[in-house]
Image (tube, rainbow, N blue to C red):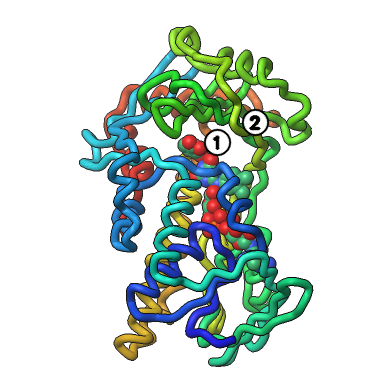
């Protein structure tokens, strides 16, 4: 089989890229190792930057976001019972939109189907050959047999554990990493959200987040040590722990007892791979970088990378210029590192780190107090939260 761009991974990054390329008249094939139902069963991010909504709209998948997505003009941070509201729209002129990654993925599948896009499921990529040439080949298995997909370019959109990053030879690749000694235990519940806006809650017992998917479905998280297993967390224990970490007047309004739709634990990590392009191979999204989820940047960064990659490939195929291709890695990494900084900072301020001494704990509290007292500090947070410019 042959195509112009072989896309590895059918998560949000891979699907969005195939859609944008198609709208520019560029042919692609998406190879996804899982089934469509499996991909749609994963519960992940929930907040879209305004810039992400614009890119998705440009890709023709903005309708349902416009109808069902909830614009949020602010978010709250709490420290035990103290609270500070970040007036996102007042401080930056832009809100964020609460709309789940699962729904973004569903909309992208529908758009690809409507245009006859080629997505091959249960196709596991094994390796990429000749990445330094103009004719790379992706080798994958499907139905127990090995297949080859020939392309002009390969887009690695295969998430953190996928194989494409390692197709960049070790001598040309540098990786930067920080692992955190805790994860987020998430619970998706068919209950109304406890508040109209998201609450990022710092507490001596650990971080908690109150989020939502709609007026009927809530998403909550609590920080847990990495040694904890899902079996350690019966639903009643989750609700009790959440209630202890959020402000008492908020906890009094918690609606529990609804159907639990999902529970899972995600480890926290900061990671960047440089460069994000090697020869004919481009990386995008979690294949190239990971942020801890505090700050809601993971999905938004993936969308941003795809925006830059689409622009570069469009200029190559439709205007005969390689300038975008040559600049892709530097352009994407410049934004990635700023989002890494923001996610690391939010994580550092709001979580309980077991190894922290008293001085560092006072620093965390001082950060929070500064946000309470300074509009300049709140504006900086807001600018990053709603999304840095492209
Ligand atoms: P993915 O969504 O990971 O898609 C990669 C795709 O590649 C997958 O479908 C995978 O099956 C496929 N693939 C992998 N290997 C192969 C192969 N060999 N061959 C073919 N296909 C392959 N972000 C937030 O902002 N908030 C959150 O609450 C949040 N929660 C998260 C929870 C978890 C458990 C994880 C893993 C991530 C979470 N994120 C969150 C991050 C956010 O979901 C990601 O940044 C986003 O999914 C990145 O999209 P992507 O398309 O780059 O990667
Ligand atoms: C959600 C996840 C996040 O990481 C975040 O910062 C905000 C919201 C969510 O799943 O709703």
The numbered dot on residue 348 is 1
Residue drawn 34% across the image and 88% down it? 321
Using the rendered view, name the quadrant where residue 74 is placed. Answer: top left
Residue that label 2 marks: 353
For label 2, the crowd category at 10 Å Cα-Cα, with few meaning under 14, some 14 to 19 and many 20 or more, is some
Q: Do the CB atoms of the residues marked 2 and 1 lie less than 8 Å apart?
A: yes
Q: Residue at x 48, y 84 (%)?
A: 4
- Horizontally, residue 44 falls left or right of residue 160, namely left
User: Ligand 1 shows up in which quadrant of the image?
Assistant: bottom right
The residue sitting at 30% across, 57% down in the picture is 57
> Which of pointers 2 and 1 lies earlier in the amino acid sequence?
1
Residue 17: x and y in percent read 44, 68
Measured in 3D between alpha carbons, the distance from the residue under mark 2 to the one under mark 1, in whole angstroms, is: 8 Å
Which residue is found at the position 48% from the left and 47% from the top? 101
The local crowd at label 1, few if under 14, some if 14 to 19, many if 20 or more residues have their Cα within 10 Å, is: some
Q: Is residue 380 something that shows in the picture?
A: no
């Amino acid at each position: 089989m042959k195509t112009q761009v072989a896309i590895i991974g059918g998560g949000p990054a891979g699907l969005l890229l195939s859609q944008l390329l198609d709208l520019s008249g560029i042919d692609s094939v998406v190879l996804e190792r899982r089934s469509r139902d499996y991909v749609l069963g994963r519960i992940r991010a929930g907040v879209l930057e305004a810039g992400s909504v614009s890119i998705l709209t440009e890709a023709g998948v903005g309708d349902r976001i416009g109808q069902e997505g909830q614009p949020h003009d602010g978010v709250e941070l709490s420290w035990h019972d103290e609270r500070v509201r970040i007036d996102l729209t007042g401080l930056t002129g832009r809100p964020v939109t609460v709309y789940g990654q699962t729904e973004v993925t569903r909309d992208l599948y529908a758009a690809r189907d409507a245009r006859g896009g080629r997505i091959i499921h249960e196709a596991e990529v094994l390796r990429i050959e000749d990445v330094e040439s103009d004719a790379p080949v992706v080798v994958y298995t499907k139905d127990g047999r090995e297949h080859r997909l020939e392309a002009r370019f390969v887009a690695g959109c295969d998430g953190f554990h996928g194989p494409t990053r390692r197709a960049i030879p070790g001598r040309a690749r540098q990786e930067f990493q920080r692992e955190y000694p805790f994860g987020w235990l998430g619970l998706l519940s068919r209950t109304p959200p406890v508040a109209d806006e998201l609450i990022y809650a710092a507490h001596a017992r650990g971080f908690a987040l109150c989020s939502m998917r709609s007026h009927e479905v809530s998403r909550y998280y609590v920080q847990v040590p990495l040694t904890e297993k899902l079996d350690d967390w019966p639903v009643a224990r989750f609700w009790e722990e959440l209630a202890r970490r959020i402000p008492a007047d908020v906890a009094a309004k918690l609606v529990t007892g609804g159907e639990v739709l999902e529970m899972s634990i995600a480890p926290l990590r900061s990671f960047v791979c440089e460069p994000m392009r090697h020869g004919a191979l481009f990386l995008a999204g979690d294949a190239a970088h990971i942020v801890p989820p505090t700050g809601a940047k993971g999905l938004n960064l993936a969308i941003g990378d795809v925006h830059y990659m689409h622009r570069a490939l469009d200029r190559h195929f439709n205007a005969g210029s390689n300038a975008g291709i040559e600049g892709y890695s530097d352009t994407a990494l410049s934004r990635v590192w700023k989002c890494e900084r923001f996610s690391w900072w939010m994580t550092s301020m709001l979580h309980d780190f077991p190894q922290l001494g008293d001085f560092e704990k006072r620093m965390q509290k001082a950060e929070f107090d500064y946000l309470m007292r300074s509009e300049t500090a709140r504006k900086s947070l807001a600018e990053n939260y709603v999304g840095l410019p492209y």
